[in-house]
Every structure is written in structure tokens, then in C-alpha cells.
Image (cartoon, coloured by chain):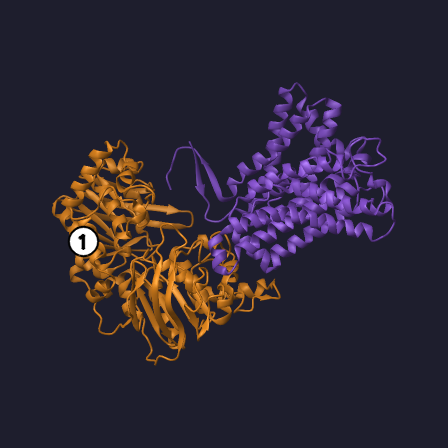
């Protein structure tokens, strides 16, 4: 079969780094093609070139045998390329149909558009009502809005950037059904993901990038996830291992925690209760937006809660703010790296000061010791393999994975008694994710209590001793992880979450 | 085509180059403005920037530089602390007025007693007055979430009414033949903020401004509170996560800027101005906003910016009297400076590329 899209010798250099070096790739009509690689391997640059966001320095692209050089995304869309980004660009306050109309050059009348949205959503098994307000949708449903937005343009090639990172297992199944249906109709799909098992289940072919170059191709069905991961990383992978340890005394105990969300589109917490013991990792699963941010904010001390709801070694923490909790040994690492866990425009040294002041003795009677802070930042950088020229660089100059290593490292090195992390490896490549998980396990092995909030179930299965699911602001009773399978967990997560929409 | 690209790191060069560029652009466009008004632009610019320092009457104008610069720097330092944290005190003019009224009021209450304690008491009262006036928007913001920009600005007009009422009523000079305005403090030695070294313009306000500069520099660089201010301005959520109490920060920043503005008002009324009068305030509180930004919200930069601004004030006066330039033209000239500075600020975090789009 003649290829739908063929890339030949694509090269793109940015000052100081070659993002893509002589990359060639062919996608046949109806093929689901995986693009694999660590963060910074050049996947984004490659798809941006296909989508017309970046112009290659050298090399040619062909679409259906004809030259293809989109000047901008509009030209790419006209040629039949659709793209679903990892980060959605939707307006919370508008309805689904209004959001989709905003992205169209000549939107049809709202009623026609709504009918077409219904039609497409039924054809492809993506339940979605055009009248719903986006702010009320789950991440999975938001993604459907983006997918439908693309499908309305009848694309020949659909690019999906990390589509499953925000979905429950059940939602992933629905998405895969849709993608298989599209593929059967002849739409090619370029699928970017870190999740190798998914790629093995879904994709027909895979191209692996490392350092901007194609380092291999494979048929995912016939290749083990480990082999693919090793191709990505270029070396053998260490699987995080928990040392055997007995759970000790209860360090953090949460009883009847109910808190209203400070944000209009947030999720209030409803009657949460759990204990975490020394030496234990409690995994809290669930799709983001179900109270995860609020739970972290309550535990870090940013969001006040009622008396007696959160206790550390039996002491009520209701009156303790973030600084007081750090003093006691209760530390946290929020999900949002830029702007919450770190100040984007400030240097890594200054960001080390942000949470390290009390426990690392970086301030004496209010006066700051910058030399000590700098060496603390350097310890984080070397201890957690943060790739940066030095601690004086701004946080925003780091890639997501590197900044995440810095944020987690900053808290772990302070030897917390309780550490709460939210999405610790979100958007982080395999090697960095493994390092972060190992750090959390080591922390627990040294007698700390760790609360890991994550939507990556494989991750939670790997590191947590007990597991609970947070859905719609409610927490299921924690259960020992050993013996749970993914199906059961999906149901604990309120697996019906993705289905409910079908009968709205 | 012109395109704007985000820089991965804020440019250090641009952070220092933009104020200079802004001054140059202001000279060019200001010159064009003066030309349009039928004046020789080169002569006008030279009069504003050259005459006060190196001209024939420089011996008279040079002390003026300190006299006009000190209140600007003093107020701008306080404003900059708040601005760094994203707390916008626009009402320094009002705090300046209230500080002056309180300071002068305490002094006049003791008239004609002579004591070395009177002046320190006036300083205290001036600081307290400005602080209290700034605490109104601060408390309203913390307690009810009101917008400090609007409240502090509106309080300027309240303060102006208060000033008028004081100069016509409570503080009116009983021996003033019915003219509005208070007794002249320059003729009351215990309350007079006299020059420390005669003929230099060096009065206690200049000393206070220098202390404030050092205080602010140390605070922002070496103290936790200064760090809290900077983080809050850069990333409010990160600051809250780091343990900053936003409400307390609002109280501190507005309070400190009010206190410094009040001090400036007090030193002014007890020294260069001499008396409380209806037109006592001349806009230092507003000009200080320009000074704060022109100085990059950096204490040392503010010193330079304050002196530059003072220069345009003095030079503007000379240009007005010698060349007949309208006062409004001078104000436009000063406004241009802030305008260009804010516009060029873009270059610190973005770079501008010219030519055909090569999408990156």
C-alpha cells in the first residue's frame, strides 16, 4: 500500500540543540503508528512539523505522494491532518458546541453544529452532549470534545499526544474502540504515549526516537514493553523495588475530612478518612479533578480544614499553615509544577528556598543564607539527576520532567516524616519516573509515611502498599494493593464515571 | 512581519538596557512634541536635562535635585515593595498629604514651645498618619476583598479635601490675615526640617530616603519577608504553598508604603514647603509610581530614577519659564517615560523578530 504520509530526512535545530536529526517515517492509511521516546527525544517537534507549527530546516514531507509543506496549522488541517493536544484548549464557561464552533473557520449555525456533534459522537462511540458546559466535564469528556473537534474536519491523519494520561481504564477502552473504528475506516493515527502496554494493545507499528534521531522501529505486538523502554532510554531499566519493611505507627490520620473547594470548577471533599503509617505508601487513585488538588492543598496546609480532621502523630493540624507543617515534618509536592510547586521566573536556588527554609536551616532569624541554599539546590540537582546548567537557571527553563525531579527531590531531601505528592510523574519520561518512584519507595523504607496521589494506576500498583480511590470528592476505603487487579481498581475508581454520560 | 517570541530566561541585559532605551525614546518623541509646539526640540531637551546640572544657575538647581528627588525616592521605595508582590498602592499621594497634615499638626500643637523632642514627634506622627491612611485600603482588601487600586486612589481625593479643610480651618495660621494655609514651619526652629549642610539641599528627608533604600535592599535580598514579597509577585500560588500569608503581606506592603509616603509628606511640609496649604501636594505620590517602575522596582534603580525624575521636574520648570513650554507638555513628557518603559519591558521576557515568519 502506498503511504499516506511519508517523512524523509526531517531535520530541525534550535539554538544549542538538534531537536530532530534526519528523521524518516511512513504511515499507511488506516495505520495506528506509535511515536515513542523520552521527554526531549524530539516527538513534539516532529508532530509540530507535521501539523504546520514548526518548519523543518531540511527534509521533505509527502502526503499521498504529493509534496506537503504546511505553512501553518490551518494548511495542515486543510490537507487532512488533525491533532489532539495533551493540554486541552477549552473554555470552561462555554458549552461543548460553543467551544467547537470557536475552533472553526466558518462555524455552521449552532443547531446544525449540535446535530453534527451528536452524529459524530454516536458514530464513534464517544458519548457527549453538545449543550453541556465544559467546566462540568471530566478530563475524559474534555478530550472527547477535542477529538470530535478534529473528527468534524474529516481528517485523514489524526495525531494524538499522550491521550490516555488523564483517563480511567474504562475511558481508555472507549477511546481505543473509537480509534480502532477510525482506523478501520482508513484514518491513520499517529499516537504518542509513554504507556507501553497501551501501545502494545493498540498500535500496528512504532517508531522510537532518542536524542532527535530514529533509533529503531518495531511491531509493538511482538515486542515486550521492557524492550521498547530500553530502546527509548538506550540502556537497561531499573524497576523500582520496595525493600521489605513493616508498617509502623500511624503518622498522618485524616478523619471525616470535608472541605468546600475554593474554586468554582473545583471538587469539594466529602467525608474522607484514612490513616498512613510510618514506612507505608498509600496510593490514592482517580482522575484529576475529582478532589485531588483540594486534598493536596488541605494536607499541605494551604486550604484550611475543620479542627480534628487532619492529625499528625495525634496532634491536630487545623491551625498549622504550610510553614508550621514543614517544621513538624509534613511536606507536600503539588501537581502543577510551574506556578504552584515552583515559581517559574525564579532561579532553582530561590525555588529551593521556597520550601527548604525551615528544615534545611536556610534562614536564621529571618535572614536568608543564600550560599547554603545554593548548595542545597546543588544537592537536589546532583541527587536527582536534574539536567540544568546550574542552580542559577530559572525554573521555567527546565523541561517538565527535570523540574518535576527537582520538585520531588527538594521535598525528599528534607527527610519528611510525611510526604504528600500529587501526580509525581505526570509527563515525565520513563527513566525519570522510575527514579522518582524509587525515591518515594526509599523514603518509605526509611520510615516516612508517603501519600501518593496519581492517576497513573500502574504507578500506584508499583509503589503503594495500600490503595484508595478518590472520585467525585469521596474516598473509597483503602485496600491492600497486593491482590487487586486493574479491573477491580477501575471499578473502585467509580468505573462508571466514563459511562454515565451515555445516558445524559 | 514582526513576531514576538518568549525567551527561555528573562534577559539580564534587557532588564538594564530598557530604562536607558526608554529615556532615549522619550527624548526623541518628546523632542518631536516640542517641535510640534513650535519650540526648538534640541534646545528644549538640553534645557530639561543639561541646564539644571551644568547650566549657569546650576548652583541653585543642584540642591533642588535632592529636595525634589528625596520624596520621590522615599515614596517609590515603599511602592516598589508592594508592586513586587502585586499589591498596587496607587494612593501614595493621599498618604503623603495625610502624613504632612499629621506631622505639621503635631508641630503646630506645640507652637511656640521650643524643644528637641518636637521634630522626632512630628516624624513619628507623619509616619503614623501615612500608615493609617494606607491601612484603610489594606484592611478593606484583606477583610472584604476590595480592590486596593480603586480604594487607595479614591482616598487621594478624600485626602485632598481634608487638606483644603485643614488649611482653611483647624490648621489655619491665626496671624495669617485670613489667607488660607498654616503657620510657616520654617520660622519655627523646633519643627523646621532645615538643611543639614546649608546650600546642599541635604535635609532629613534625604537621610530618610537613603535609609529606606538600604532597608529595602536588605529586605528584598536577604530577608524572608522580602523573599515572600518577590515570590508572591512571581507566582502567588507558589508563595501560598511556600507558607506566605497573603493577607499579612498586603497589610505589610500597603502599611510600609503608606508609612514612607507619610514620612515624605512630613519632611516636605516641615522643610521645603514650610506650610500646609491648599495646593501643598504637587503630585509626588503619582510621579513616584513612574520612579518605581523606571527603577525596575529595584531600590538602587529607584535612586537613579528618582534623581532623573527630579531632573525633569526642575528642567521642566526652567523650560517653562525660559522657553514658554506649557506645563502640560512637561507632564506629557514625563508620562511618555513611563509609557516607553512599560512598553519596552516586553523585551525582557520576549524577543522581537523581524522579517518573514519562520515559525519556531
Q: Nearer the viewer, residue A116 or A354?
A: A116
Q: Nearer the viewer, residue A103 or A81?
A: A103
> In the shown orientation, is residue A259 left or right of residue B340?
left
> In the shown orientation, is residue B75 left or right of residue A144?
right
Whether residue A206 is visible: no
Q: Position of residue A56 (x, y in %)?
A: 32, 42
Q: Position of residue B246 (x, y in %)?
A: 53, 54
Quadrant the C terminus of chain B occupies: top left
Which shade of the palette goes to chain B? purple
Provide the secondary structure element on which disc 1 rests: helix
Q: Which residue is mark 1?
A: A174
In the displayed structure, B33 sits above or below A478; it is: above
Q: How many marks?
A: 1
Q: Position of residue A356 (x, y in %)?
A: 51, 65
* Quadrant of res A152: top left
In the displayed structure, A479 sits above or below B307; it is: below
> In the shown orientation, is residue B259 left or right of residue B177?
left
Q: Position of residue B347 (x, y in %)?
A: 51, 40
Residue farthest toward the top in the current orientation of the protein: B38
Whether residue B162 is visible: yes
Quadrant the N terminus of chain B occupies: top left
> In the shown orientation, is residue A209 left or right of residue A173?
right
Q: Residues within 10 Å of mark 1 (few under 14, many from 20)?
A: some
As drawn, the chain in orange is A
Q: Residue shown at 37%/73% (left/top)?
A: A276
In the displayed structure, A403 sits above or below A2; it is: below
Q: Residue shown at 56%/40% (left/top)?
A: B150
Badge 1: chain ID? A
Amino acid at each position: 500500500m502506498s503511504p499516506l504520509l511519508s517523512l524523509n530526512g526531517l531535520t530541525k535545530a534550535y539554538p544549542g540543540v538538534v531537536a530532530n536529526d534526519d528523521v524518516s517515517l511512513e504511515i499507511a492509511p488506516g495505520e495506528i503508528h506509535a511515536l515513542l521516546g523520552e521527554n526531549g527525544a524530539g516527538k513534539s517537534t516532529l508532530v509540530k512539523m507535521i501539523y504546520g507549527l514548526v518548519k523543518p530546516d531540511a527534509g521533505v514531507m509527502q502526503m499521498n505522494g504529493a509534496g506537503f509543506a504546511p505553512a501553518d496549522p490551518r494548511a495542515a488541517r486543510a490537507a487532512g491532518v488533525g491533532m489532539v493536544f495533551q493540554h486541552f484548549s477549552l473554555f470552561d464557561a462555554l458549552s461543548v458546541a460553543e467551544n467547537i464552533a470557536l475552533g472553526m473557520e466558518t462555524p455552521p449555525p449552532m443547531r446544525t453544529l449540535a446535530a453534527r456533534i451528536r452524529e459524530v459522537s454516536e458514530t464513534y462511540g464517544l458519548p457527549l452532549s453538545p449543550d453541556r458546559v465544559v467546566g462540568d466535564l471530566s478530563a475524559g469528556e474534555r478530550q472527547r470534545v477535542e477529538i470530535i473537534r478534529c473528527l468534524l474536519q474529516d481528517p485523514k491523519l489524526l495525531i494524538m499526544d499522550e491521550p490516555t494520561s488523564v483517563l480511567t481504564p474504562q475511558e481508555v477502552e472507549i477511546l481505543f474502540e473509537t480509534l480502532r473504528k477510525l482506523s478501520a475506516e482508513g484514518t491513520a493515527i499517529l499516537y504518542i504515549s509513554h504507556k507501553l502496554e497501551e501501545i502494545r494493545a493498540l498500535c500496528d507499528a512504532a517508531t522510537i526516537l532518542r536524542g532527535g534521531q530514529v533509533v529503531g522501529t518495531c511491531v509493538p505486538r511482538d515486542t515486550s514493553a521492557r524492550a521498547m523502554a530500553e530502546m527509548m532510554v538506550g540502556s537497561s531499566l531499573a524497576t523500582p523495588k520496595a525493600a521489605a519493611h513493616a508498617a509502623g505507627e500511624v503518622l498522618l490520620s485524616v478523619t471525616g475530612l470535608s472541605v468546600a473547594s475554593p474554586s468554582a470548577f473545583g471538587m469539594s471533599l466529602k467525608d474522607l478518612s484514612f490513616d498512613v503509617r510510618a514506612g507505608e505508601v498509600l496510593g490514592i487513585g482517580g482522575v484529576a479533578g475529582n478532589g485531588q488538588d483540594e486534598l493536596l492543598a488541605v494536607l499541605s496546609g494551604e486550604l484550611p480544614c475543620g479542627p480534628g480532621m487532619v492529625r499528625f502523630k495525634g496532634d491536630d493540624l487545623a491551625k498549622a499553615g504550610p510553614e508550621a507543617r514543614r517544621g513538624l515534618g509534613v511536606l507536600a509536592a503539588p501537581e502543577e509544577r510551574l506556578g504552584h510547586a515552583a515559581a517559574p521566573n525564579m532561579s532553582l536556588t530561590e525555588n529551593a528556598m521556597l520550601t527548604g527554609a525551615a528544615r534545611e536551616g536556610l534562614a536564621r532569624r529571618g535572614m536568608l543564607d543564600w550560599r547554603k541554599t545554593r548548595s542545597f539546590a546543588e544537592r537536589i540537582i546532583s541527587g536527582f539527576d536534574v539536567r540544568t546548567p546550574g542552580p542559577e537557571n530559572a525554573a521555567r527553563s527546565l523541561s517538565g520532567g527535570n523540574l518535576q525531579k527537582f520538585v520531588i527531590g527538594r521535598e525528599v531531601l528534607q527527610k519528611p516524616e510525611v510526604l504528600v505528592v500529587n501526580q509525581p510523574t505526570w509527563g515525565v519520561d520513563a527513566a525519570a519516573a522510575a527514579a522518582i518512584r524509587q525515591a518515594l519507595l526509599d523514603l518509605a523504607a526509611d520510615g516516612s509515611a508517603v501519600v501518593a496521589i496519581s492517576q497513573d494506576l500502574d504507578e500506584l500498583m508499583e509503589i503503594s502498599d495500600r490503595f484508595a480511590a478518590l472520585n467525585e470528592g469521596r474516598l473509597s476505603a483503602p485496600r491492600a494493593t497486593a491482590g487487586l487487579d486493574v479491573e477491580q481498581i477501575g471499578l473502585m475508581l467509580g468505573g462508571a464515571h466514563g459511562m454515565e454520560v451515555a445516558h445524559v | 512581519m514582526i513576531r514576538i517570541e518568549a525567551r527561555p530566561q528573562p534577559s539580564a541585559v534587557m532588564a538594564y538596557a530598557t530604562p536607558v532605551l526608554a529615556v532615549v525614546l522619550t527624548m526623541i518623541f518628546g523632542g518631536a512634541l516640542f517641535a510640534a509646539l513650535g519650540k526648538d526640540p534640541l534646545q528644549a531637551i538640553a534645557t530639561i536635562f543639561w541646564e539644571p546640572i551644568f547650566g549657569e544657575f546650576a548652583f541653585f538647581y543642584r540642591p533642588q535635585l535632592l529636595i525634589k528627588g528625596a520624596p520621590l525616592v522615599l515614596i517609590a521605595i515603599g511602592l516598589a515593595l508592594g508592586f513586587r508582590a502585586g499589591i498596587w498602592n496607587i494612593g501614595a499621594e493621599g498618604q503623603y498629604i495625610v502624613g504632612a497634615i499629621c506631622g505639621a499638626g503635631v508641630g503646630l500643637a506645640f507652637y511656640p514651645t521650643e524643644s528637641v523632642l518636637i521634630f522626632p514627634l512630628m516624624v513619628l506622627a507623619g509616619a503614623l498618619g501615612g500608615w493609617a491612611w494606607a491601612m484603610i485600603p489594606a484592611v478593606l482588601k484583606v477583610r472584604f476583598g476590595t480592590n486596593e487600586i480603586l480604594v487607595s486612589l479614591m482616598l487621594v481625593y478624600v485626602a485632598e479635601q481634608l487638606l483644603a479643610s485643614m488649611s482653611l480651618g483647624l490648621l489655619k495660621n491665626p496671624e495669617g490675615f485670613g489667607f488660607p494655609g498654616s503657620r510657616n514651619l520654617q520660622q519655627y526652629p523646633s519643627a523646621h526640617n532645615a538643611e543639614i549642610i546649608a546650600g546642599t539641599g541635604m535635609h532629613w528627608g534625604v537621610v530618610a530616603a537613603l535609609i529606606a533604600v538600604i532597608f529595602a535592599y536588605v529586605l528584598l535580598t536577604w530577608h524572608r519577608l522580602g523573599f515572600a514579597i518577590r515570590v508572591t509577585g512571581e507566582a502567588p500560588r507558589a508563595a501560598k504553598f511556600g507558607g506566605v500569608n497573603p493577607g499579612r503581606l498586603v497589610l505589610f506592603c500597603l502599611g510600609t508604603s503608606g508609612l514612607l509616603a507619610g514620612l515624605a509628606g512630613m519632611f516636605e511640609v516641615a522643610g521645603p514647603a514650610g506650610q500646609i496649604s491648599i495646593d501643598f501636594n504637587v503630585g509626588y505620590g503619582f510621579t513616584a509610581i513612574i520612579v518605581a517602575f523606571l527603577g525596575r522596582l529595584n531600590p538602587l534603580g529607584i535612586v537613579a530614577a528618582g534623581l532623573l525624575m527630579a531632573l525633569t521636574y526642575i528642567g521642566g520648570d526652567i523650560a517653562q519659564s525660559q522657553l514658554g513650554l506649557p506645563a502640560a507638555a512637561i507632564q506629557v513628557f514625563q508620562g511618555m517615560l513611563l509609557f516607553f518603559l512599560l512598553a519596552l519591558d516586553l523585551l525582557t521576557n520576549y524577543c522581537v523578530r523581524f522579517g518573514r515568519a519562520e515559525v519556531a
